Amino acid sequence: MLFNLEHPERLGVVTEVDEDADVDDEPDDDEDQTSEEAGLDATDDDLQRRFDQMTFVVATGKLAVQPNWVNVSDVFRTDQDAPFLGKAGIERVDDPRYTKYSQRLAKLRAIRSYVYRMDVLERALSYDEVTEIFVRVNSLGTKLRSSDLALAQITATWRNSLAIFESFRNKFVSAGFDLDLSLHLKNMIAFATGQSRFLTVGGRSKEQLQEAWKLSCDGMDFAVNFAKNNAGIDSPVLLSSPFVLITLSYFGHKRDYRLSAEDEDRLRFWALLANAKGRYSRGSSETLLDQDLATIRDGGGTTELIDRLRLQVGRLDVTAEELFGRNQRSALFKTMFLAFRAAGAQDWESKLAIALDHKGATHRLQFHHIFPKAVLRGHYTSREADDIANLAFIAGRTNRTISAKPPAVYFAPLLKTLGPGPFQAQCIPTESSLLDIANYKAFLADRRSDIAGRLNEFLGTA
């Protein structure tokens, strides 16, 4: 664990950071690597701003070398402040940081003498009683997810069930579709109760849970197969919310997995639109999911699901205005990847089709700032630089080759070698007038219009 000597006065939360081991595989200053997450990672600046607000962070090599981050174990091993103050660049006692950092190190060391309370429960208590105590104690202590508390209640009723749940989850992990265990539990609750909330799980018998689990496993098999092979959503990172799978699962179950050609077509239409429009990633996601489950439970079909989506988002087609200000975290960014892939988009050098599962740092997919951030710096804001209309999908080596070159420089040789096809596949305008930094906003507007058209063509809303 690392401790931030410069943390805000109000203590921040602990976070865990994923870090690539090979520094050479990291994107350059003007790149953001998608790797297996299709461009959903935060930029370096975004991450650093988040870390600056943290107090404790799981150690990473990048943070450990920064002067204001100290190793908690090292602080616990000594009562001397000098090594840590020296690392922070404090050489004089009149440095304004000297007292603040010394006091914070003292508070950190005080954790060593903290007295923890332990309640030992009587052996005579039943497993149900122990579980209830666990749920109540933790509800006002360390924040646990509702699925954690539900799992405790489920395993109290159905002993040794966790191994069964994990085995089913691991089947999808092996197939490259890693889903959190909580999603499988929520799917089970949907099959048991017709709604998705865990509040009623405590009242279900072992037999009811076992039957719901069996049915929900068949439903999830159908949902993942449909998402991958019918809708082309072949990775969970391309989902704006995994709740889409629960609706697909429940729909398949209620149709006894016998869909007409029209049902299949309309269900695919709904799945892609719900994913693109962020059906379950805006507002109360569980409330929206419960509405859709109730629609299916009460005999509704794809028409009713689409009507509910329309009621939520208004028009179903995508407009250029809807893309304004969006970035790589948008649900539409995921759909943009799907649409470009369907249009035959390839890496500009290797000609490999864009995909999330390419092996090796050379070919691993990255999202590329067409106008590199270094080129835009000082002229446009970071938010404008990260606009969805400034992002394209190429391989890591190609991205590093381009580095911080402006498009007015690197487009010409690519166009000469490749022609306009690879750019058209990703709706990238190549008119020389739009490649000038002064016309950056005009470039974004032009490309937004083209992207909207491509998305509507892909979604079937054109």
Image (spheres, helix red, strand yellow):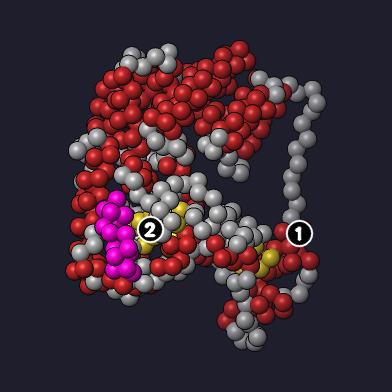
Provide residue 357's location: percent of width, then percent of height. 50, 46
Provide residue 239's location: percent of width, then percent of height. 42, 39
Query: In terms of image quadrants, where is residue 140?
Result: top right
Residue 277 among those drawn in magenta? no
The circle on residue 268 is none
Provide residue 216's location: percent of width, then percent of height. 51, 21
Where disc 2 sits, the SS reads: loop
Q: Residue at x 33, y 35 (%)?
A: 272
Label 2, residues with CA under 10 Å away: few <14, some 14-19, many ≥20 = some
Instruction: Indicate whether 3 appears above or below 329.
Output: below
Q: Of the residues shown, which amino acid type is indicated by label 1?
A: Arg
Q: Is residue 453 visible?
A: yes
Closest to the observer, 55 or 48:
48
Closest to the observer, 12 or 303:
303
Instruction: Indicate whether 136 appears above or below 20.
Output: above
Direction from residue 150 to residue 130 in the image, left or right: right
| Secondary structure character of the magenta stretch overall | helix
Which residue is denoted by mark 1 in the rendering? 112
Instruction: Indicate whether 124 appears above or below 416.
Output: above
Q: How many marks?
A: 2
Q: Residue at x 62, y 77 (%)?
A: 88
Direction from residue 194 to residue 73 in the image, left or right: right
Where disc 1 sits, the SS reads: helix
Which residue is denoted by mark 2 in the rendering? 348
Boundaries of the magenta span: 410-425
Query: In terms of image quadrants, where is residue 277?
Result: top left
Direction from residue 126 to residue 367 in the image, left or right: left
Q: Residue at x 29, y 25 (%)?
A: 266
